[in-house]
Image: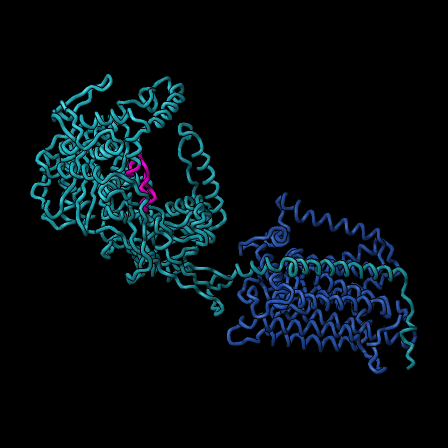
Amino acid sequence: MIEPVSDRRPPITPQLALRVAILGFVALALFAVVFFRLWYLQVLSGDQYLADANNNRFRELRIQSPRGEIVDRDGTVIVRNKRAVVVEMDPSELPQAERDLASRWGQAAGRRAARPRSERGSQVRIPPIPTAELRTRFERLAGVLDTSAGAIHRQVVRSLAIVPYSSVRLKTDVPRSVLAYLSERAELFEGVRVQQTYLRDYPRDKLAAQILGTVGEISPAQLKQEAFRGVPQGTIIGQEGLESSYDRYLRGEDGIERVQVDAFGRPIPNDRLRDSEPVAGEQLKLSLDYKLQLTGQRAMAGPLNPGDKAGAFVALDPRNGEVLAMGSNPSFDPDLLTKPITQKRYDALFGDDAGAPRFNRAVAGLYPTGSVFKPITAMAGLQSGAITDATVISDPGCIDIGTREFCNAGDVPNGPVALRQALEVSSDVYFYRLGQQLFGLDGQVLQKWARRLGVGRETGIDLPDEFEGLIPDRKWRARLNERERKCRPGNGGRPCFALDIRPYNTGDNVNLAVGQGDVQATPLQMAVAYSTIANGGKVVRPHLGLEIEDGQGRLIQRIERDPARRVKFDPANRQAIMDGLRLAAQGSRGTSTDVFSGWPHDRFPVFGKTGTAERPPKGDQSWYVAYVQSETRPIVVAATVEEGGFGAETAAPIVRLLLSQYYGVDKRIVRGDSRTR
Amino acid sequence: MNEPASNRLGGLRLPFDPLLMLATAGLLVASLVTLGAATGDDVPGDPNYYVTRQGIYFAVGLIAALALSRIDYSRLRELKYGIYGLMMAGILLVTVFGGVTRGSRRAIQLPFFEIQASELGKVLLVAALAGFVVDRSRRLGERDTTARLVLVALVPAGFVIASDLGSGLVYIAILFAVLFVAGVSWRHFAGLFALAATSIALVLAAAPAMGVTVLQDYQSERLTSFLYPSDDPGDAGYQQNQSRIAIGAGQKTGRREQATQARLNFLPEERTDFIFAVIGERWGFAGAGLVLSLYALLVWRGLRILTTAKNLYGALIAGGIVAMLLFQVFINVGMNVGIMPITGIPLPLLSYGGSSVITTLLAIGLLQSIYAQGRVASATKGRVLSF
């Protein structure tokens, strides 16, 4: 094949060759740049961009699962759910200007809060709505939600300042008509999401309000906790009370609806996406007896407590620590806490001026106990050998110990009394002497026995807000002195916590022996201590949770609470104390005998002790703790009313009412007139 | 300097460059396949709406290119004033009567379709400018010559820039390439570059500072947005961000039917400006690389034909066309991968649109003509000096 044409092509000029070469190199360089960029995007960073692309197209909608219901021991519903419509604002649909404004305001408010109170100056004002377009949006929405554009703006800014990524709940529980209006005109309400949600519903009004607790969205701090590992952001969890203690059973699992959307946010079907169904939470059965609880709360808030003073009551099954009733007065309607509330309104409803109704005085109220402490002192005296049940102490009404004079209430002399009589008539002098005697022994036996029986330490109840209280002893006094010494120079030499700096002395021990002075105990601790004596040494761990059940009430899991510990004491000593307590409620000179007049002691023998704690400058605090012996249904009830006067005046009649309810005895209100502490 | 064996089929001389043909055909197929995949849902009831139309444009363009390749391009030199006049008339007509699309005046509405005069003007400019250069080829070293040629190209470029920045820049790229191939002295180039740099600085920085509006807001925003990616769909940076995500998500071999960036419309202008991102997402590095290789082949063949042209006129036209293609490919793909500003330059042969497709095919027809004429000339009497 002879084809020499190409060989004969004349050479091009060197200049053109150079320039073509340059053009070629430029082309090569440009293609190389693009190729490397492609390599970088697709091969080196491909995973990242693939994730971005999927982020673009998926919207995950949370389908809230209903929390489990809470029922009493007979299945009476105490907490349930109701469906509600909430209107939320999706922060990612807000203009950047609004988000920036919120973060700046948040920082400014944070700086202000960090300054000392005196230098804070006025509140940091929230700047006006940044863009006209947003103002129009907010105004349109405000018209529907019956509020103002400014109010929505402030809500959005406050919420974003705290949690920047979380959706802002604008209104909870809106009427159906609003829901329909908003969903039909979704394009007019950019960023507005209308969602079905569940709110906690309380069909029994104020019943057990303090112990049920509240629910709320999981906080950023909680998300990091071990207990909430795997819980997605935005989940509603129990934040307080039983809702918090049993959250992992009640919570359930939210469903997730994954939606593919296009660039305009319109949903585009995609059958590859898997939704997960919400799983409802489990039902919590409480040990509470609804009727007993109701009786207790009514008694606390009713005519037995004429001044409607603050107070609390606890009813325990002394065999196992099941809490049959627990209430705190004043109470409140927990429904108020299911919706957003302004700080001002919150303070008005729940502040100190309103009697701090959210405060659960049964587990967190720390009070001197007065004479209901005496069985503990008796146990310490008997067990340490300081006395026997036959030891007689003369009670002339008043005695001098050290430089101080200690007297019975009204200086009434009781004559020579042994332990049983001392408890029956509640002889202070007997126990003053005992306290004095126990002070002389090694090892602070009184304190030791108080703590053994469960006072001055946490009972371990399944509520998160329990306080441990205080049994004063030498060590405590030394620490107090230390703090006082450090504090006084900065306080101009004036006392800070304690009037004087001195060691723990006989007087302190004498006071403690009758539940006076610095001792601080909760009604629950007293109930536990009485239970321990009554049941022969088993320190029960009180609990409200009884069973976890499924939605149909079928048992899933029993909540077993082992006793915290056992204490050993001589049964004869226990018997002596129980005899004294029976006499106090039934004997001719018993301090609460008149309260229990007409009570069928033959069927339901009551062992009870009154108490009257002095809390100057306030009035006396009324106490009563009772144990009812029963083969099948024993009970220990403790009640206290602040400024309620003598124990027999208010607390004991309340306890009688509770016992009447529990045993089906005719409810009779008898106010005792014993003026004994 | 042996021609590749593929240039002969069984000893038969082909009247066209087969590699150029191959590259062109490959790109046309790529365009139809991509449009078919990306626009199936765009027109309800007619999944092939855009494919059909693009196919018709290809047919028209190919027939025109075939015709052009069979005639001697050198005769166009005599028509240079007519060609230049036609180009200017089209551009001016658009400037006065043109329809407005997204803020730019670009097209003349005709009963059946609209002509984008600035597209067609690219190839017309190449033909006319090369003719003017050849006329003054003996006085190429003079500053006066360079100035005149620059003026000849800048006048239409100026009009086009006023409405369509990207196309105007293509005109300037053509001007530089033609002058470069013609052999204008380096000193003149240095001066031209200095001039260009100064005017860019003036337009982008100095003029706005003095309150003179040279570029529309949307234009300067698009020019600078590739420096600032954005999530806001209202921003120009959003488009490039989405384009980058689409390409990156394609990874090595593409997402095929899962190419959601294009299908769910996150990718803007998927038929035209961002069609390369569609390819990158759907067929990954493999597909995008293949398309780029086809362009590289196109450019290589263009340069090769430049060197085999029978006369300077042919070399200049080839140079102008290579520059036109290279510039458009680089700017468009660069914009898709996020290293070049958004200028609204279509990707030659791939982007949907009649004017761009036909213009590019005409240019390829011209290249084929230069190739064929070069072969004829070298076969008969060696290089013809027809200056």
- Answer with the quarter of the image where residue B121 lies: bottom right
Q: Nearer the viewer, residue A462 or B92?
A: A462
Figure quadrant of the N terminus of chain A: bottom right
Q: Is residue A481 visible?
A: yes
Q: Nearer the viewer, residue B286 or A307?
A: A307
> What is chain A's hue in the picture?
cyan
Question: What residue do we see at 32% from left, 27% from top?
Answer: A442
- Answer with the quarter of the image where residue B289 lies: bottom right
> What is chain B's hue in the picture?
blue
Type of secondary structure dominating the magenta stretch: loop
Q: Position of residue A132 (x, y in %)?
A: 45, 48
Asked if residue A465 lies in the magenta stretch, the reply is yes
Asked if residue A120 lies in the magenta stretch, the reply is no
Question: What residue do we see at 39% from left, 58% from top?
Answer: A253
Q: Is residue A523 above or below residue B180?
A: above
Q: Position of residue A73 (x, y in %)?
A: 24, 54
Q: Is residue A390 above or below residue B273?
A: above
Q: Position of residue B311 (x, y in %)?
A: 86, 68
Which stretch appears magenta?
A452-470
Q: Position of residue A107 (x, y in %)?
A: 47, 39
Figure quadrant of the C terminus of chain A: top left
Left or right of B69? Residue A443 is: left
Q: Nearer the viewer, residue A226 or A126?
A: A226
